Amino acid sequence: MLEHGGRLRMAAQQHGIALADWLDLSTGIAPYGWPLPAIPAAAWTRLPELDDGLEAAARAYYGAAAVLPVAGSQAAIQALPRLRRDARVGIISPAYAEHAEAWRREGHQLSEIGEEAVDAALDHLDVLLLINPNNPTGRRIEPQRLLDWHARLAACGGWLVVDEAFVDCTPELSLASSSHLPGLIVLRSFGKFFGLAGIRLGFVLAEPSLLDRLAELLGPWTINGPARALATSLLQDGAGQQHQRERLRADGLRLADLLGRHGLTPTGGTALFQLVRHEQAASLHEFFARRGILLRLFANPSSLRFGLPGDEAGWQRLEQALKEHP
């Protein structure tokens, strides 16, 4: 299993700090949401049904013609490579490591490339995969450039796979409205923006024939009834979404400013996290961990990812640690 953020219990054991005494900034998940609606009793007692409104709510929220709910976008990341055979796959790197691992596991020919190398590589690829905005760098690629890449791939039966897990606060970057095009596959996370990672829900946006193949592979009832009911309600709550978006944008800027004022100017980020490249990232990670603040450490390039504190006490605690860091 690959290394991920959010492994708070392991950190608590390693450092001898009680679980409740940690400030977990190791994930790119919104640390807050809004009051959750009541879940109908039938959602607990009946098998999930596909005409309960979830797909319609998701199509409206994402502006997509067709969607497939999955048990977190991770489920799609692992399943999509099983829909092709012997593909030449390019992944714009650095990137969320599960993508490369999933394609490698299924025996595909994998190459990790920089953004500047894509145009030259496209004629030799069957699949190009990228994250926009990128995790962990926060790099953004304009939609028209992505659509140009897609057109070149699709002309030869190829795929462009775009993981948009962190795009909700910058919806102008999304390719959701073009996801009906053959060979374009868009992955969306529900838990990150809505602050509900534990619900394990995501969506695949693509042409119906591909979604049908993916659904057959994943099998029935992949999303439980309570999750479907809760997500349907939140996807229809436009006012709540706007408030969440504004708050996350403000806090993302606040975090970048706070880090910059203490000598850790971010090299990139999104509304949900900021990335700081630093030659001594490992020792800084340990410094913060000894103070009960968990960050996400990356070895290549040597860097730290800071998520958002969830309340004012968390912000003050982070600032105090920043004042003390070497």
Image: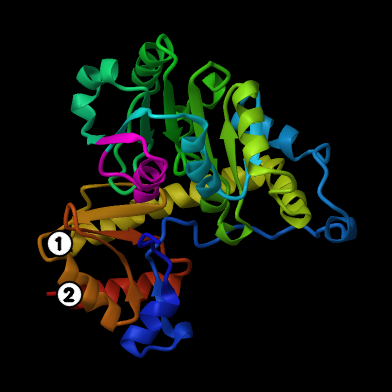
Asked whether the beta carbons under mark 2 and mark 1 sit within 8 Å of each other, the answer is yes
Residue 3 lies, in percent from the top left, at 35, 62
Task: Answer few, some or many: residues within 10 Å of disc 1's Cα (few below 14, many 20 plus, some between 14 and 19).
Answer: few
Residue 14 against residue 95 in the figure, above or below? below
Bounds of the magenta span?
Answer: 93-111
Task: Answer few, some or many: residues within 10 Å of disc 2's Cα (few below 14, many 20 plus, some between 14 and 19).
Answer: few
Separation of marks 2 and 1 at Cα, in angstroms: 10 Å
Q: Which mark is residue 263?
A: 1
Which residue is disc 2 drawn over? 325
Three-letter residue code for mark 2 = His
Three-letter residue code for mark 1 = Gly
- Residue at image position (39%, 83%) is 12
Residue 58 sits in quarter: top right
Q: Nearer the viewer, residue 260 or 85?
A: 85
Residue lying at the far top of the rendered structure: 155
Residue 216 sits in quarter: top right
Residue 220 lies, in percent from the top left, at 74, 44
Which secondary structure, mark 2? loop
Count of numbered badges drawn on the protein: 2
